[in-house]
Image: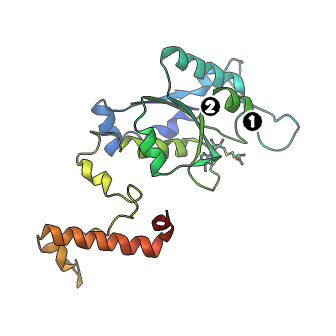
Amino acid sequence: MRFDIISVLPDLLDSPFAHSILQRAQKKGIAEIVVHNLRDYATNKQKSVDDYPYGGGSGMVMSIEPFARCIEALHAERKYDEVIFMSPDGETFNQTIANELSGKGNIMVLCGHYKGIDQRIRDLFVTREISIGDYVLSGGELPAAVLVDAIVRLIPGVLNDETSALSDSFQGELLDAPVYTRPADWRGHKVPDVLLSGHEAKINEWRHDQALIRTQTRRPDLLED
Ligand code: SAH
């Protein structure tokens, strides 16, 4: 699976993909993540990628030309399943969307800044608009990193233990159960006996019960669905 992320601050995305599971996925050749510097596609001498908003008002708006040139250059190289714009007014990202997108081949991701991007970019090039939650960040890079991370870890072969993702919260209707590791007794705070019993069926039953209790108390809405 390949991601092409278009950003005016590509350095912001150096670290999120350079460690742990995301790094491993790229080393294994399962995921390719390429970040493009929008400024490389600016046409004016100052290499500017934004301009004043028509109609006045505060904040700058990202211009159509650099985005259009970058998007068209990528379209000329390969076919894209989705061109996603990260935007607070998009559909709210969740595990269902992550699962769906993890089955795609090539995805382009556009990161906005300032007041946003010229509406014509959205109208003409974008196939899907995704928000990572009801709050406003200063740029689309962190949302893009969230999106790519959630998707990549679901691609078969990325996690060492495939079953691990299946018990994660939101993968089914239940939140994940509590987890513990050594020591079994830390200053008198003990790990539940059942987890030390070695009895697999009982452990599974305990985990299921705990997941259910957690879901009922924290997210009863998940059970209603
Ligand atoms: N004026 C816009 C916000 C612009 S914030 C509005 O009110 O809708 C600048 C950029 O940050 C956005 O274009 C988007 O790419 C990104 N961004 C900010 N918050 C986001 C969120 N919750 N989800 C996804 N992208 C977000």
Chain-order first, disc 2 or disc 1: 1
Query: 10 Å neighbourhood of mark 1: few (<14), some, or many (≥20)?
Result: many
Q: Of the numbered discs in the image, which one, if any, rests on residue 61?
A: 1
- Residue with the most extreme right position: 55
Q: Position of residue 151 (x, y in %)?
A: 42, 42
Describe residue 174's horizontal placement relative to residue 108 as left or right: left
Q: In this orientation, does residue 86 appear?
A: yes
Q: Mark 2: which amino acid? A: Val
Mark 2: give few (<14), some (14-19) or many (20+) Cα within 10 Å.
some
Three-letter code for the amino acid on which mark 1 is drawn = Val
Residue that mark 2 sits on:
126
Vertical arrangement, residue 7 with respect to residue 69, above or below = below
Judged from this view, the residue extending furthest toward the front is 224
Image position, residue 164 (x, y; %): 27, 53
Residue lying farthest to the left in this orientation: 198
**Mark 2 CB near ligand 1 (8 Å cut):** no
Q: Quadrant of the N terminus?
A: top left
Where is residue 29 shown, x and y percent of the image? 30, 29
Let me know if residue 34 appears in the view: no
Q: Secondary structure at mark 1?
A: strand
Mark 2 element type: loop
